[in-house]
């Protein structure tokens, strides 16, 4: 066993006790939670598409998965180089790629306390734009039946409203049903309104294990944000639900889209459609990829002067 101080063990025990106080099992009563949730929406059970039903739904059209990835060299917030990739991949063949790089080293100096948040926003916006760009290209060229986008659609709206408006317009023009699938829900909308005494809880904590497999909670219209419908869904054995949202102009497609997500998700999986996992695996920017690309395209003297930290040179 690795050497661990007694102090660290005691600190972890204290954290465990604090977590137990903030998330007591007495608050977790699924039946009572379900009853209260009906004030904010409705529950709906889904069956997976049979093969013939799915073939009829898709016809000769494909399903497209969209995902992106970013990774950076190791170093301080200022002395890093970030590599971005986005991919739209169709089930019937075809890929659309977009890529970019970013380093704060090429920007003018700003106040130190502003840098981490600013650079994080910059990276998030760059990645969102790349994902929206490949999504637009895929919809215009392939005209798929449906597009599955990794993460909530709301973050595209927040990162670049103008670009997101283009995505929505193209989706409606080309009749492409778009859905965002967020594996982690950080919102506290339902908790704040219906369970204000559950301090520190998120909607993910509230709905953990509450939904049955194949069951969704469809939020009422008053919770729609950024012109998007919202839902929470449990498409696999995992008790952690996923967040779903879609374009409000395609609200009539909501049930079919949720059923499609269910049909494409392995029951023993983590709750994400297998096709999105394939796209994620292909687009992922790994540490090895970042290191290889930087070593190949950035001159050695610049790497050592600007990007290599003392930490990288440790011998033990």
Image (cartoon, rainbow, N blue to C red):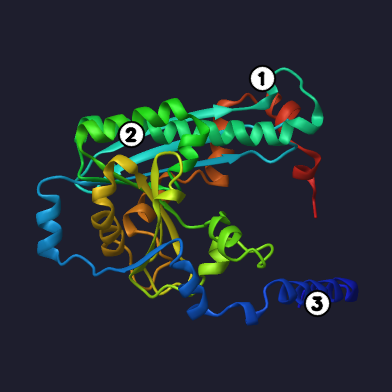
Quadrant location of the C terminus? Answer: bottom right
Q: Residue at x 56, y 64 (%)?
A: 194
**Circles 2 and 1 in contact, beta carbons < 8 Å:** no
Residue 55 visible (yes or no): yes
The residue to which callout 3 is attached is: 13
Q: Dot 3: few (<14), some (14–19), or many (≥20) neighbours within 10 Å? A: few
Q: Dot 1: few (<14), some (14–19), or many (≥20) neighbours within 10 Å? A: few
The residue to which callout 1 is attached is: 106
Say which of marks 1 and 3 sits in front.
Answer: 3
Residue 91 vs residue 196, the one in the foreground:
196
Residue 80 visible (yes or no): no
Residue 296 vs residue 154, the one in the foreground:
154
Mark found first going from the N terminus, 3 or 2: 3
Q: Work out whether 3 lies above or below 86.
A: below
Residue 56 horizontal side relative to residue 113, left or right = left
Number of marks in the image? 3
For numbered disc 1, what is the local secondary structure?
A: helix
For numbered disc 2, what is the local secondary structure?
A: helix
Distance of label 3 from label 2 (alpha carbons): 49 Å
Q: Residue at x 54, y 28 (%)?
A: 101
Residue 189 lies, in percent from the top left, at: 55, 55
Distance of label 2 from label 1 (alpha carbons): 33 Å
**Circles 3 and 2 in contact, beta carbons < 8 Å:** no
Mark found first going from the N terminus, 2 or 1: 1
Residue 296 lies, in percent from the top left, at: 55, 30
Q: Work out whether 151 lies above or below 162.
A: below
The residue to which callout 2 is attached is: 168
Distance of label 1 from label 3 (alpha carbons): 45 Å
Q: Dot 2: few (<14), some (14–19), or many (≥20) neighbours within 10 Å? A: many
Mark found first going from the N terminus, 1 or 3: 3
């Amino acid at each position: 066993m690795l050497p661990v101080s007694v102090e660290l063990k005691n600190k972890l025990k204290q954290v465990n006790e604090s977590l137990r106080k903030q998330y007591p099992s007495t608050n977790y009563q699924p039946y009572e939670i379900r009853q209260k949730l009906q004030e904010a929406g409705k529950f709906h059970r889904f069956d997976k598409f049979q093969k013939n039903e799915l073939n009829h739904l898709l016809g000769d059209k494909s399903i497209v998965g969209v995902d992106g990835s970013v990774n950076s060299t190791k170093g301080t917030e200022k002395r890093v180089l970030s590599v971005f990739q986005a991919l739209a991949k169709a089930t019937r063949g075809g890929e659309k790629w977009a890529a970019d790089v970013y380093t704060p080293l090429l920007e003018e100096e700003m106040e130190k306390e502003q840098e981490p948040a600013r650079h994080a926003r910059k990276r998030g916006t760059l990645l969102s734009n790349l994902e929206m760009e490949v999504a637009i290209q895929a919809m215009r060229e392939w005209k798929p039946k449906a597009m599955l986008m990794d993460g909530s659609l709301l973050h595209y709206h927040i990162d670049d409203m103008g670009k997101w408006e283009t995505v929505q317009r193209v989706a409606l023009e080309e009749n492409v049903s778009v859905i965002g699938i967020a594996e982690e829900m950080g919102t506290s909308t339902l908790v704040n309104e219906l369970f204000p005494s559950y301090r520190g809880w998120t909607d993910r904590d509230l709905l953990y294990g509450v939904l049955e497999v194949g069951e969704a909670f469809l939020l009422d219209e008053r919770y729609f944000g950024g012109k998007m419908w919202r839902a929470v869904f449990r498409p696999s054995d995992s008790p952690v639900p996923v967040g779903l949202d879609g374009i409000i102009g395609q609200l009539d497609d909501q049930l079919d889209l949720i059923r499609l997500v269910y049909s494409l998700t392995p029951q023993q999986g983590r709750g994400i459609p297998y096709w999105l996992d394939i796209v994620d695996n292909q687009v992922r920017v790994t540490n090895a990829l970042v290191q290889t690309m930087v070593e190949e395209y950035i001159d050695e003297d610049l790497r050592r002067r600007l990007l290599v930290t003392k930490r990288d040179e440790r011998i033990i």
